[in-house]
Amino acid sequence: MLLAVLLLAALATPALEARKSDREQPMSVDSDASSGSLDDDGALTLTGNVRITQGSLTIEADKATVQQRGGEMERIVLEGSPVRMNQLNDRGEPIASEAARVTYTPGEEIVLLSGNASVTQPRGVLRAETIRYNMDTGNIDSGGDGNRVRMTIQPKARAAAN
């Protein structure tokens, strides 16, 4: 299970403007069951009430699959109804994300939220069928899949009062 924790470590900041120091914190992973391989080329699947915490980050999912190739983490897939991710940003403000599926590709530092995805921050809400977040650049791409993108942006004064 220790290797599973290490493999999931790269999943530390899937939310927008997430707290950078969370990646340096210990990670706790809990699930009802796990199965698969801890080999250099294989997959490990955690199922049932999957809960991952690291620093201010909390992830809840029904299932988490970690795939490795050549001893390197290749992809992490979280599935749920929905997957819920909560974290504080570097200013201490809460960020909440939800989606039916979250895919993290460490080599590209890309987090893809798909299936009724949403990200809620003090200044507003972004909802789309897909939201793609680049952890290196902070860029967000959403939509482009034939579905509408919806945003609610609060005025600065109102967001500060919340």
Image: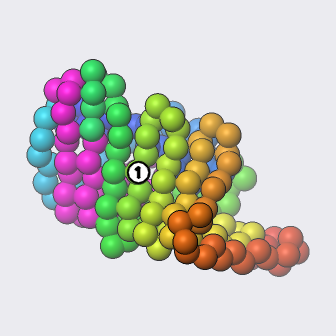
Could one spot residue 137 in this view of the protein? Answer: yes
Tell me which amino acid carries mark 1.
Thr
Left or right of residue 91: residue 114 = left
Work out which residue is located at the far front of the displayed protein and give it. Answer: 146
Residue nearest the observer in this picture, 107 or 144: 144
Q: Reply above or below: 49 against 39.
A: below
Left or right of residue 79: residue 134 = right
Q: Residue at x 38, y 61 (%)?
A: 101
Neighbour class for label 1 at 10 Å: few (<14), some, many (≥20)? many
Tell me the residue that label 1 is attached to: 103
Quarter placement of the N terminus: top left
Colouring of the image: rainbow
Q: Position of residue 21 (x, y in %)?
A: 59, 38
Picture quadrant of residue 37: top left
Left or right of residue 54: residue 159 = right
Q: Residue at x 43, y 69 (%)?
A: 115
Q: Is residue 41 magenta?
A: yes
The majority secondary structure of the magenta stretch comes to strand
Quarter placement of the C terminus: bottom right
Q: Which residues are magenta?
A: 39-66
Q: Residue at x 48, y 54 (%)?
A: 112
Q: Reply above or below: 36 against 91.
A: above
